[in-house]
Image: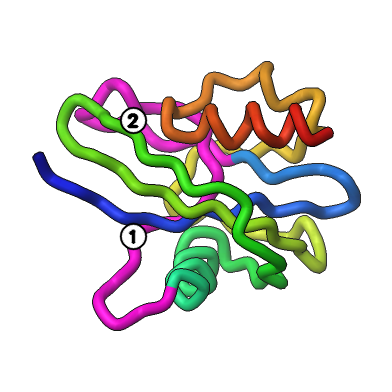
Amino acid sequence: MKKVEVVAAIIYFENEILCVQRPKNKLNYISEKFEFPGGKIEQGETQTEALKRELIEELNIETDIKSLFLTVVHQYPDFELTMHSFICEAKSKELKLNEHIAQEWLSINELKKLDWAAADIPIVNKLIMNG
C-alpha cells in the first residue's frame, strides 16, 4: 500500500483555530471534508520547512510554528497517511484560499460541528480533550 507523509498546521489566532475545506475529489472519503492545512513533505525538507512552504502555497499565510502536537497514522482505502500536526500562531486572519473551497475560524468547542477528514479527527479530539 502506498504511504504518504504529510504535515498539518493547527493555526491559532486569538483563541480560534483555522479549519479549511477540501475541494471535490475523486476519493469521496476526503472530498469536501474539513482538514487542518498542510501537505506532503518533499525530499530533503524538514517537517517545519514543508509546513511553512505548504502554508504559503495553499493560503499565502505565514505562521510561527510552536511545537509538534500529534502524529497520526491513518489507513485510508487507497493509502496509509502519516500526518505530523503542529501548533502554530498566525499574525492575522488574512489569507487566500488557493486550494480549499471554504474556511472557518472556530473555538475548540465548535470544532466538532464540521465534517472532518478521518485522519484529522484524532487531532480534533485531542484539542477538545486538552481544552
State the image coordinates of residue 47 (x, y, percent, origin top left): 45, 70
Q: Which mark is residue 40?
A: 1
Residue furthest to the bottom: 44
What element does badge 2 sit on? loop
**Magenta span dominant secondary structure:** loop
Q: Is residue 56 left or right of residue 2?
A: right
29 in magenta: yes
Between residues 125 and 100, which one lies in front from this camera angle?
125
* Residues at discs 2 and 1 in contact (Cβ within 8 Å): no
Residue furthest to the left: 1
Amino acid carrying label 1: it is: Lys
N-terminal of the pair, mark 2 or mark 1, is: 2
State the image coordinates of residue 62 (x, y, percent, origin top left): 65, 72
State the image coordinates of residue 84 (x, y, percent, origin top left): 47, 54
Depth check, mark 2 against mark 1: the one in front is 1
Query: What's the residue at 58%, 67% (across, down)?
Result: 60
Between residues 38 and 81, which one lies in front from this camera angle?
81
Image quadrant occupied by the C terminus: top right
74 in magenta: no
Q: Few, some or many C-alpha atoms within 10 Å of disc 2 (few <14, some 14-19, many ≥20)?
A: few
The span picked out in magenta is: 20-46
Q: CA distance from mark 2 to mark 1?
A: 19 Å
Residue located beneath label 2 in the image: 24
Q: Is residue 39 left or right of residue 75?
A: right
Query: What's the residue at 43%, 37% (across, down)?
Result: 22
Amino acid carrying label 2: it is: Lys
Query: What's the residue at 35%, 27% (across, down)?
Result: 31
What element does badge 1 sit on? strand
Query: What's the residue at 31%, 22% (across, down)?
Result: 29
